[in-house]
Image (cartoon, grey):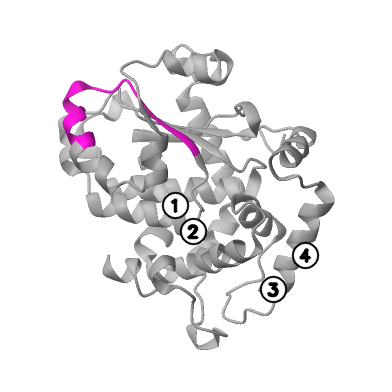
Amino acid sequence: MANNLLEYDEQEFYQQLFKDFNKTKEDLNSFINIMREWAETQKHFPEKPNVNLLRFVILYNKFSVEAAKQKLDMFYTARSLMPEFFCNNPLTEDMIFQRKLCYMVPLPKLADDHVRIIYVKLNPEFADPKYFVHKHVAVQFIHLFTLIGKNDLSYRTHCICDCDCLQLGHVAKASLMIIKKCQIILEKVFSNRIASLHLVNFPAFLENFVNTIIKPILIKKLRERLQIHTGNEILFELFGKERMPRDIGGEEKSLEEINDMLHQQYELHKDRFLELEKLTVDESLRPAKLQNDEILGYYGSFRKM
C-alpha cells in the first residue's frame, strides 16, 4: 500500500507487469536508468526527473523508450504551452471548492489486472449549474493524474462518470474546446492508458448531445472504449461492490470521504505541486527541434487551440 488512498500490492504489480510486458523488476529499473541518463542530456529540462516520474512514463508507454522520451518532454513543455491548465495548485481555495462540488477521485481498491478506477460525480449539494466551471474540471484531471503518476503502481485506468446530478445547464456550460484540449493532454502528456470509459445513470436528454457532438470529437480509442448505462448496477458486475463507493450502494468509503483523503494527499505533496507550478523549459537550450511537431502539439494542435 503506497498510502491510505492508493492501495496496491507490489508483488501483484510485478506479476501483472510480467504478464502484460514480460518484464521484471530488474527490467523496469534498467529502463529507468536508460531514461535517467537520457534526461541528463536534455539541458532544456527544468529539473532532473525523479524515479517516480521516470517509472510513470515508462509504464504508461509500455516500455517504448522513444515514446517515453516524447512524453517526458511534453510533461515539461506543456506547462509553458498551456499554463491555464498546468499552472494551477490543487491547494488554492478555488480548487479545494471545485473538488467539493465535483468529485473526481481514485477509488482505493484496484480493479482486476491492476487497473486504477477513477470515479467522477457532481456533489448533489452543489448540483446547481451556476457552480460549474468546465476548465476547473480539466485542471482537476491534471492534478489527479500527476498524483497517480507520482504515487501509484497502476498503469491503466477505468474512468466512471456518474451523470446522476447532471442538468441541461451543465451541458450548456460545457466547452468543446476544453474537451479537445483535455484529449490532447491525455494523449500527448499522460499517454491515454484508459482501459474503459463508463457513463452511468445516463439521462435521456443527453443522448442526442453525446451522439452528435461529443462522440465525433473523441479520438478513436476513447470512442471504442466508451460505454453508456442508464443505471449503475452494471458497475457491481464489472468491478464488484467492494470497490464501489457507498454513494451508489457499494462497500467502499463514500465519495466525500475519499475526496477528503485525496485532499490529504495533495497536502502531503504540496511542495511538489509548488515546484510544478514554476517549471518551464528553456527552449534556447533544446538540443533539437521537437520531432513531429503536429503530433506533439508544439507548433500544431496546442498553438491552433
Instruction: Check if mark 2's residue and mark 1's residue have beta carbons within 8 Å.
Output: yes
* Quadrant of the rendered image containing residue 209: top left
Q: Position of residue 216 (x, y in %)?
A: 25, 45
Residue 71 position by quadrant: bottom right
Q: Disc 4 versus disc 2: distance between alpha carbons?
A: 21 Å
As measured in the structure, the alpha-carbon distance from the residue carrying label 2 to the one carrying label 1 is 6 Å
Q: CA distance from mark 2 to mark 3?
A: 18 Å
Give yes or no for contact between labels 4 and 2 (Cβ–Cβ under 8 Å). no
Q: Amino acid at mark 3?
A: Trp
Q: Which mark is residue 189?
A: 2
Find numbered disc 2 in the image and state the secondary structure of the residue it sits on. loop
Residue found 77% across the figure and 65% down from its top: 33
Q: Residue at x 37, y 52 (%)?
A: 182
Name the kind of residue labelled 4 in the image.
Asn
Instruction: Identify residue for label 1.
Output: 186
The three-letter amino acid code for the residue at tag 2 is Val
How far apart marks 1 and 4 lie (CA) works out to 25 Å
Q: What span is colored magenta in the figure?
A: 195-211
Residue 91 visible in the shown view: no
Q: Which residue is mark 4?
A: 33
